Amino acid sequence: MTRSPIEFQVIAASGSARAGVLTTRHGPVPTPAFMPVGTQATVKALTPEEIAETGTRMVIMNTYHLLVRPGPEIVAAHGGLHGFSRWPHALVTDSGGYQAYSLAKRKRLTERGFEFASHLDGRKIDLTPEEAMRVQGLLGSDIAMQLDVCPPAQVERPELVSAVERTTRWAERCLSARAPGQALFGIVQGGTDIDLRASHAETLARLPLDGLALGGFSVGEPPAHMHRTLAQVVPHVDPGRPRYLMGVGTLLDLVIAIGCGVDMFDCVLPTRNARTGQVFTGGGKLIIKNARYASDLSVLDASCPCPACAGGYSRAYIRHLYQAGEILAHRLLTLHNLYCYARLVQAARLAIIEGRYASWAGERIRELGAPEPTE
Amino acid sequence: MTRSPIEFQVIAASGSARAGVLTTRHGPVPTPAFMPVGTQATVKALTPEEIAETGTRMVIMNTYHLLVRPGPEIVAAHGGLHGFSRWPHALVTDSGGYQAYSLAKRKRLTERGFEFASHLDGRKIDLTPEEAMRVQGLLGSDIAMQLDVCPPAQVERPELVSAVERTTRWAERCLSARAPGQALFGIVQGGTDIDLRASHAETLARLPLDGLALGGFSVGEPPAHMHRTLAQVVPHVDPGRPRYLMGVGTLLDLVIAIGCGVDMFDCVLPTRNARTGQVFTGGGKLIIKNARYASDLSVLDASCPCPACAGGYSRAYIRHLYQAGEILAHRLLTLHNLYCYARLVQAARLAIIEGRYASWAGERIRELGAPEPTE
């Protein structure tokens, strides 16, 4: 087993929660870490400087989207996504499989891989494990994800088993094909079937993967099922490697999953919800377009240090911008929501280091469970 | 005549071109000055900090748009547009008449003012000179513009004369109605009729207006007609007050108008063209969506200090963002274009101070006349 292109050190634990440092070619990342999603090689509405200002040190970009446009060769000509997008810190790419399955047309899944037609121009693309590694190699991310099979919630057990087994074979093919210097994470599947998940985690741990992800969550199952499954499955995921819960989640999901021992997250919620005018705060959500904010002179959240709140932009002004379709609304709301997520994982990390995660998490869960105050 | 709420000092001249300082309640503005347009209380896609970074010290916002949404009372509750939009420097508002005439429905122009229905909700609005001043008082701009009558190009002389005479009467009504501490500019009309323009400029100069604007340009007449008219009319506009050419124009228009003695400009071109992917450079325009830029690793303009160029964003990356409909494309292109305009007026000012405006302008005119290089 060659030396891993990343290092992962757990520096403190509090119950099952752990604080660590993930060291990559593009610097260290404090964990637990939340990764904003930069689908098209940009975290929507923001610059790399603004994202880094939140304390974020790792983002994820989408191989499927970049494969269909502009194509990985153009990105490689810039020295990879770091040069292309000007993001200087750690960068993860997914394998492209998930979006290929959800967005592309005329798709076919075989043992070889995914065949599909681009949703943009109908071009036929053949996404095998080897091709997923070639493309991610050109994209130059610090951490690549294996191509996996991610069935929807509520499929029958035989289909889950088949997805797990194929995902293992694809992990081996990805390991054989990976680009030099690029870390590779395997992906644990198995739905909400505890035994299947646990055994898959143990199978993948026998491979020289640099990290282990939990895929196939937040695919339609009730949040409580996910929380319960995580509590039982995460202990079976090798504690020596970073554990990454893909595509999750709400602030509440993060608090619970960190408590189970998860180290990394990515989710479109803070950025996507910003674009629909949903504002996260420590005490719940507010919907900026509501008429009640039309003459509200207060900032989004008086305790927030983000440029929208610290800059003194009133709810009334941001609502006006939102109603007028102004880009600045999306910028301010996206910044605010990403600060909210970044502050949550930073506070979680501190609570772990100080050995008081359970009580911190209990308080957060009470706050986050509270509904938006009504008029 | 009470003391003017602004001060204007000409500090240097070179031919008819002049460099000055316009001092407002919100600080000094070096002239010649180009004002970005913040239609809905935001210069589209940018923050106030980013605009100020370009060296810009004065913006213009649109009374019509803010009157129909969110309404001037909400703005006044924030202490005016400065508090609402967080722009800390000088701020001009127009009267609302121009947009009322071009955007609103069921409009009627009488001696009393404009009657029209809001383009958003059909609400009837009665925009008299007095109402234009009341609304601009609530908006709290440093400089308000009189309500004027701005006929399209190529109307017959009697209509031009009638517009000029009514504009004068409305200037008097605006003076009587203006808010304390707010400067008021009159607007010279008269189309491309030199005698009418000159006599209107002299008529308005007899009123205690704080500055004199040239309206009714760039309304459909060929640029050469505007340039010729300006050369003959600007000398008749009181040199002791700031001269403001409204709604103009291209970089070439600015070079020529500054040479005639104009001090202030506003135009949507740099911001609007950014949104359609047109990039201004010292040597002409480039259209970022052209296929030739798909793998172009160079920045927009290697000599440009803007965050897009100095930040190392390649043409290929910006084209990708533009094609993908990403907000960051609009941000980077808007910043670049506003830097281009800001740098032009800054360089013009320096050339005036150094007494070499004619030769500087000659070089710019040659460069700006050059078409985009072809493949």
Image: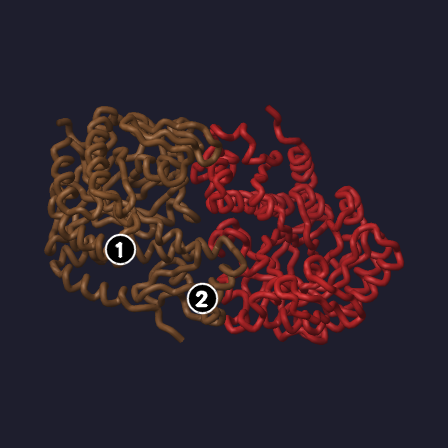
Chain colours: A red, B brown
Neighbours of disc 2 within 10 Å: few (<14), some (14-19), many (20+): many
Residue A93 in sight in this render: no
Q: Chain of mark 2?
A: B
The residue under label 2 is B314
Residue lying at 42% horizontally and 31% vertically, measured from the top left: B117
Q: Of B161 and B197, which appears nearest the observer?
A: B161
Q: Position of residue A265 (x, y in %)?
A: 65, 52
Q: Position of residue B148 (x, y in %)?
A: 26, 35
Quadrant (top left, top right, bottom left, bottom right) of the C terminus of chain A: top right
The residue under label 1 is B222
Mark 2 residue element: loop
Q: Of A265 and A114, which appears nearest the observer?
A: A114
Nearer the viewer's eye, disc 1 or disc 2? Answer: 1
- Same-chain check, marks 1 and 2: yes
Residue lying at 73% horizontally and 48% vertically, measured from the top left: A260
Neighbours of disc 1 within 10 Å: few (<14), some (14-19), many (20+): few
Q: Determine which of the numbered discs, if any, sits on residue B149 in the image.
A: none
